[in-house]
Amino acid sequence: MSTSRTSPSRSSLRVRCTALFAGLTAVGALLAAGTTGAHAADGPLRDLAAAKGKVMGTAVTGSKLTGTYGEIAGREFNALTPGNAMKWGSVEPVRGTFDWAEADRIVDFAEAHGQQVRGHTLVWHSQNPGWLDNGTWTPAQLGQLMKDHIATEVGRYKGRLATWDVVNEPFNEDGTYRQTLWYNGLGADYIAQALTAARAADPAARLYINDYNVEGVNAKSTALYNLVKSLKERGVPIDGVGLQAHLIVGQVPSTLQQNIQRFADLGVDVAITELDIRMQLPSDSAKLTRQAADYKAVVNACVAVARCVGVTVWGFTDSDSWIPDTFPGQGAATPYDENYAPKPAYHAIAEALGGTTTPPTGACTAAYSVTSQWDTGFTGQVRIACTGAALSSWKAGWTFGAGQRVTQAWNAACSQSGAVVSCSNASYNGSVPSGGSVTFGFNGSWSGSNPVPTVTLG
Ligand code: G3I
């Protein structure tokens, strides 16, 4: 799939919806002119971030960068981090045999969309290839392997990546060094050696140490602070610290901004590198509202400190998040739901970045997405969701911008006249309660490009 579908003007891609008329019953504040993307000042996030001199990034999976996923990744973010594609186990699964396909794809996509790339990650204890983990190495061999790996990977992308997470997760919770392949073989100096090798391989890249549970002031973040201070004093190249920020709803550390500031005062940049805020499933509007406040608090803390360069979310959609696999029963941790509808968290991020509007407290929204696409056809869906409002019947309409045609629909009756598509509920799904949703689907034809239209909900 070419990336041409992802490059129409950003405003044309915003999914806007207005619920205006009959069938709408208010269960709280009524709503609906302007739900989801109807807040012009709310996005795209990358523009709001850029206006504040900040980065708004997301981790991505390279193979997914088409269709709706690719459109949102390209439209809303000005930085990408490969979620897995640049890890050692991904790029050199067999010693001396490299696979750069997914990493290259992400870097190419980023360049085509005017986005920075954060390289992730060079020296870690996890997701290493079996041959490395299971090998027996002298300290000299291990040091050489590490330096060669850095020279190869950083060198490959020299001049193209803004930033590298050079060392990932070096500390235990109590602030002692984590016992890893690297620490056990080379001692704590592996960190300085890795940074020095990365600087040599790409002098222009910003070099970071990245860790989790270092967002607030605590034993672990203080150990990181002391390490960075000592590296600076020794003249070791260190440009920034990454605070991963895998957080839990209601538990944003109160000392986040203070902690960011103390690192900044050492003379390094700070980035929030892997933000997600998980909750116990199922989500509900109270949890989503709390989550939005938490997202806003994190982004606010970064905005408040000049040397905080920005925030990256660890996946932008709940359908591409690591949380449910790792924390059974938890999830809904990202700013978009599994159907690519922006959640309250999205609007909260926008507001923290200077967006001037907030979503209405009661609203029904419609999110259009392309779920699959082939040479001449595609399958699309529209998800209608209500929070603090409800529908007893609905109509959803849009105007195709590039000659697309709906050929068949299910869970709705759709007709098309010229470019204008009108869909209304089936006999069994007109009712959408507050907190509920309905989804209808369709097949369509396209050629040339298949941009996402603006949906009007009524
Ligand atoms: O690619 C294989 C696939 O072939 C196989 O069918 C499938 C079955 O389990 O596994 C796939 O690999 C998974 C990989 O993600 C890609 O999806 C691994 O099992 C899974 O362990 C791996 O998880 C990644 C995790 O790092 C590993 O620790 C997550 O996607 C990734 O988001 C996560 O990211 C880390 C950061 O790098 C560092 N900070 C913490 C963060 C969350 O753990």
Image (cartoon, rainbow, N blue to C red):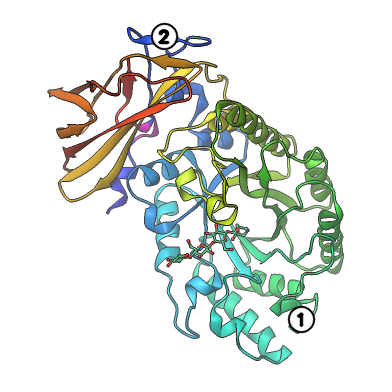
Q: Is residue 230 above or below residue 446?
A: below
Residue 138 place in picture, x, y as percent? 70, 92
Which one is nearer the viewer's eye here, 365 or 83?
Answer: 365
User: In the figure, residue 407 lies in which quadrant?
Assistant: top left
Q: Is residue 4 above or below residue 53?
A: below
Q: Secondary structure at mark 1?
A: helix
Q: Kindly identify the residue that appears in the image at 32 percent across and 45 percent down.
A: 67
- Which badge, 1 or 2, comes first in the chain's sequence? 2
Tell me if 311 is positioned left or right of 140 in this view. left
Q: Toward which corner of the image does residue 148 lie, by quadrant?
A: bottom right
> Mark 1 packing: few (<14 Cα in 10 Å), some, or many (20+)?
few
Residue 4 x/y as whole percent: 29, 47
Q: Main secondary structure of the magenta part?
A: helix
Image position of 259 with respect to 194: above or below = above
Per the image, is 10 magenta?
yes
> Residue shown at 50%/85% (left/top)?
95
Q: Is residue 228 magenta?
A: no
Residue type indicated by callout 2: Thr
Q: Which residues are magenta?
A: 9-13
Circle 1: residue type: Asn
Residue bearing the label numbered 1:
184
Residue located at (21% from left, 43% from top): 378
Residue 209 is situated, as x and y percent measured from the top left of the image, at 71, 61
Q: Is residue 403 visible?
A: no
